[in-house]
Image (tube, rainbow, N blue to C red):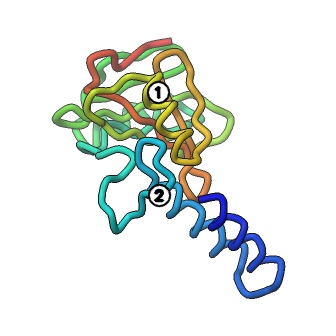
């Protein structure tokens, strides 16, 4: 993977490749890496993790009460928990929407469910794939190719949490 990264950087420096295309190439190589095996490629199969589905999305909202009411009224979501700074709304199945009070509205993160979730193993695997995970207690986050925050989690037996 190191040789590929060097080649991509060189191609950018020599004007043969845009920075955006180089980043996309690096992400593709990193995502294809499996269990720290730098020889793995997407063509060989196994992704770093296999998503079982979208677990939840988390949104930053300026007006927590108004947004919570919006999702209840227009989508029929039910409040699982609501605190002063956040609300968790059941979105069907094992899915939910998290609303977090913030000065700026927009996406906070989105999460995928994976089998055998263990935060330490997830961090190690993501690092082995060339990504930069951040662990916060039992939660693991990393950025996608565009800088959006992704979380990996198990079934939501520990979710949702209040303040």
How crowded pointer 2 is (Cα within 10 Å; few <14, some 14-19, many 20+) is rated as: few
Q: Where is residue 8, by image quadrant? A: bottom right
Which secondary structure lies at badge 1? Answer: helix
Q: Residue at x 62, y 40 (%)?
A: 132
Q: Position of residue 19 (x, y in %)?
A: 72, 73
The foreground one among 39 and 42 is: 39
**Residue tagged 1:** 65
Real-space Cα separation, disc 1 to disc 2, in angstroms:
50 Å
- Outermost residue, right side: 13
Q: Quadrant for residue 158, please give it.
A: top left
- Give the image location of residue 30, x and y in percent: 53, 55
| Residue of label 2 | 39
Note whether 138 is above or below 63 in the view shown.
above
**Which residue is rendered at x = 50% and y = 40% of the image?**
126
Location of residue 127 in the rendering, given as x and y in whole percent from the top left corner:
56, 39
Relative to 22, residue 133 above or below:
above
């Amino acid at each position: 993977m190191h040789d590929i990264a060097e080649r991509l950087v060189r191609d950018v420096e020599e004007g043969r490749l845009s920075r955006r295309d180089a980043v996309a190439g690096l992400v593709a190589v990193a995502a294809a890496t499996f269990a720290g095996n730098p020889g793995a490629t997407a063509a060989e199969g196994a992704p770093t993790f296999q998503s079982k589905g979208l677990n939840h999305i988390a949104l930053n909202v300026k007006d927590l009460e108004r947004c919570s009411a919006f999702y209840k009224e227009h989508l029929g979501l039910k409040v699982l928990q609501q605190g002063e700074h956040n609300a968790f709304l059941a979105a069907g199945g094992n899915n939910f929407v998290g609303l977090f009070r913030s000065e700026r509205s927009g996406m906070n993160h989105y999460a995928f469910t994976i089998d055998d979730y263990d935060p330490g193993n997830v961090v190690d695997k993501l690092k082995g794939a060339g990504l930069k995970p951040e662990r916060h207690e039992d939660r693991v986050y990393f950025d996608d190719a565009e800088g959006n925050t992704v979380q990996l989690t198990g079934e939501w037996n520990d979710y949702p949490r209040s303040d």
